[in-house]
Image (cartoon, rainbow, N blue to C red):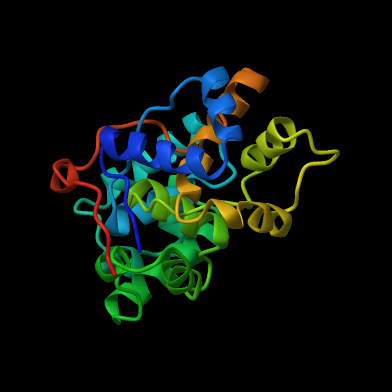
Amino acid sequence: MTYFIHSESDLDTSFAALIKIDPRFQKIMDGAGRPNLRRREGGFPGLAAIVVSQQLSTASAGAIWGRLAAAFDPFEPAAIRRARAERLARIGLSAPKIRTLKEIGKALDKGVLDLDAIGALEADVAHAALTAVHGIGPWTADIYLLFCLGHADAFPAGDLAIQEAMRLAFNLKARPTAKEAIVMAESWRPWRGAAAYLLWAHYRVAKGRSGAPIAATAAPKKKSKAKQRSNG
């Protein structure tokens, strides 16, 4: 079954289910507090914003995204595909990010990637569909699934804050690699997304700074009334 986190109530349900699977998360939530829902706009703008934010501070990413969104209004795949690389570079995008955005635009325009259909797929299938597009890595795919689609089983194992939080919370000798984190998180299915929320909260308390890559925002209007649902 595929579950989604579209509301604060859904988030509570996911935490309760995760803690039932692995009671260690109760101690993590007791120490770090209950995280708030984090949602971002989906579709091409949402995915593009995540690409822009990679390896940048929140302030830098916000500034570049603001210039990009203002320069292309409405923000559509075809417009980014046609845009000259020089123009995008002046906005602040690196060459790899420019290539990735253009590849995403191409995939959407050609129907190779369907961001609406991905919302109903199981986490691993949706992840594979996203990473099949050149330039979309595992971290980008997982962050999109978790924060833009509210996928309850998305788990960004390659996120350094997640890895460090796992080391601290579970008293590991070393920070787990992405592959090791995936293996460790296997038993948390289908609530790995809830685990990510709590691990980021643990990181914030332990390190004194936020590790979550997406700022908390209100859920998109089209999904604000959605309830947690399952797809067989």
Give the answer, above or below, for where 218 lies relative to 84.
Answer: above
In the picture, the quarter occupied by the C terminus is bottom left
User: Residue placed at 52% from the left, 25% from the top?
Assistant: 29
Give the answer, above or below, for where 153 lies relative to 133.
Answer: above
Give the answer, above or below, for where 168 lies relative to 47.
Answer: above
The mark total stands at: 0
Residue found at the very far right of the displayed protein: 173
Quick check: can you spot residue 56?
yes
* Residue 153 in the figure: left or right of residue 231: right
* Residue 214 in the figure: left or right of residue 32: left
Quick check: can you spot residue 57?
no
Q: Position of residue 68 (x, y in %)?
A: 35, 47
Q: Position of residue 105 (x, y in %)?
A: 35, 69
User: Residue placed at 50% from the left, 66% from the top?
Assistant: 99
Q: Position of residue 28 (x, y in %)?
A: 58, 27
Give the answer, above or below, for where 127 lies relative to 71.
Answer: below
User: Residue placed at 36% from the left, 76% from the top?
Assistant: 107
